[in-house]
Image: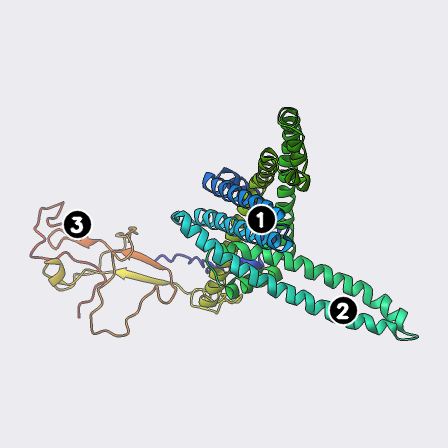
Amino acid sequence: MRREEPVNAPGPAPATPRRHDAATHAHLPMDLAATVLDGALDGLRTLSVLGLLAGGLFGVGLAAVLANVQALLANSIALAVVLNLVAVVLAMVVLNGAGVALMDRTAGRPARPLAAKLTAGARALARSIALALIVAAAQFAFAMAATALLWTTRLPGIGPLLLALLLPLLIAAATVLLAASSATLLLCAPAFWSGQSLRTALGATLARLRRWPLEILLSLLVAGLLTSALAALVGMLGLAGTVFVGGLAGAVVGTEFAMATAGNFSAATASGSGHAIAAMAGSSTLFLLGAVLPLAAQIGSLCHLGRKLDALDARDVVAGDATTEAPAQPDVVPETALEAGLASTLETTALPANETGIETPEPAPQPDAQQTDRIVPQPPGAGERPRSADSGTGFRAADAGLEVTMIVRPGRCPACHASVERSDRFCGECGHPLSHAAPEFPGRDDS
């Protein structure tokens, strides 16, 4: 009987969290930088965000100018401060509303009405103010601790030595604190736009800063440089247009318009000219409109960066769960029957008569030595004997990890002893019917 050598297939490799993958960390800065650039382009291409920013800032700028004019005419500095503060709050609500709109678009959520965007923007602004107060409290605590340490440098004798040691440490700590504070405020903004609470957003941001500090700071640096470059470009183009049009309008309208265009709002307002006030309002709103493109690019960068970090967190969580549920396979595989050089060989026999419809006679004599066995490949399970329902401990080769070689012996016609197949109903040599007399299968013992 022929034996086939088993093949010991290696088991599945253990799942490893992606956060420990060195290749992933190597490409993470480039991925984050590309995400920032894609987000900036997305913000500049989204017309709804551009329209919301332009319309909101134009209205806020116009209202602020009129409020300042009223405060100047009333000669009240307190009124001017209050009105400007209200204008700043309204501008921040519009800015956060644009962030909510772009975050919804990035996350694939349906667009909200304008009132819902502004309401969500106001909630995000409230969380941002609370976070700014927390950051300010942390910086104040650091300042108090640094002040107390610096007072120790006034001790006689060891004061200069303490100053030499404390100065670089405090400068480094202050640098890290300021960088972390800026990164926290920027990274929490998209979380607030998504509707997350202050506690959830702050916890996730601090965890990310601990895991990828350099990658996140570099990506924020790329976003800041891109926004600054775009703002400088828009400012230069706006200045060139202002000088060109302001010179023409000053020659036509008068010197008050030229003063208002140049930024001398006090002199323009004191003149009482309607043209001067209109020029002042136009210049102020133009300045705010010049910030639309840089703000859209910044909002898009933060939204896409926040979504990318969310995806990285979700991927690491899934990888960690897979590692917990499927522990790593041991390096040394336990010895099994296959490694001991054993192989299991099963011989297929005729099925019972009640399943094939063939009457089973007494076993025939064994064939002579010239009739050799032939190996017929069969699909898995073709030659298995069905297990009975009451057999609780049946042998299964697959459970034991053994490779099974299916060796099928040919049947014999009871009349002429010619080879027949199990599916034959008549002998191919003599035509003897096989429905009432089962063919002989050598090696079967029905006792």
Q: Can the viewer see residue 193?
A: yes
In the image, 254 versus 233, the foreground residue is: 254
**Residue that badge 2 annotates:** 146
Which amino acid type is shown beneath numbered disc 2?
Ala
Classify 10 Å Cα crowding around label 1: few (below 14), some (14-19), many (20 and above): many
Q: Position of residue 146 (x, y in %)?
A: 76, 69
Q: Position of residue 288 (x, y in %)?
A: 58, 41
What separation in Å lies between label 3 and label 2 (alpha carbons)?
103 Å
Quarter of the image containing the N terminus? bottom left
In the image, 435: left or right of 145?
left
Q: Position of residue 432 (x, y in %)?
A: 8, 49
In the image, 59 versus 78, the foreground residue is: 78
Coloring scheme used: rainbow
Chain-order first, disc 2 or disc 1: 1
What separation in Å lies between label 2 and label 1 (alpha carbons)?
35 Å
Q: Can the viewer see residue 14?
A: no
Classify 10 Å Cα crowding around label 2: few (below 14), some (14-19), many (20 and above): some
Query: Which numbered circle lies on residue 32?
Result: 1
Please identify, in this view, whether the residue under mark 1 or under mark 3 is nearer the observer: 1
Q: Are marks 3 and 2 in contact (CB under 8 Å)?
A: no
User: Does residue 333 lie above or below 230 as drawn?
Assistant: below
In the image, 203 versus 439, the foreground residue is: 203
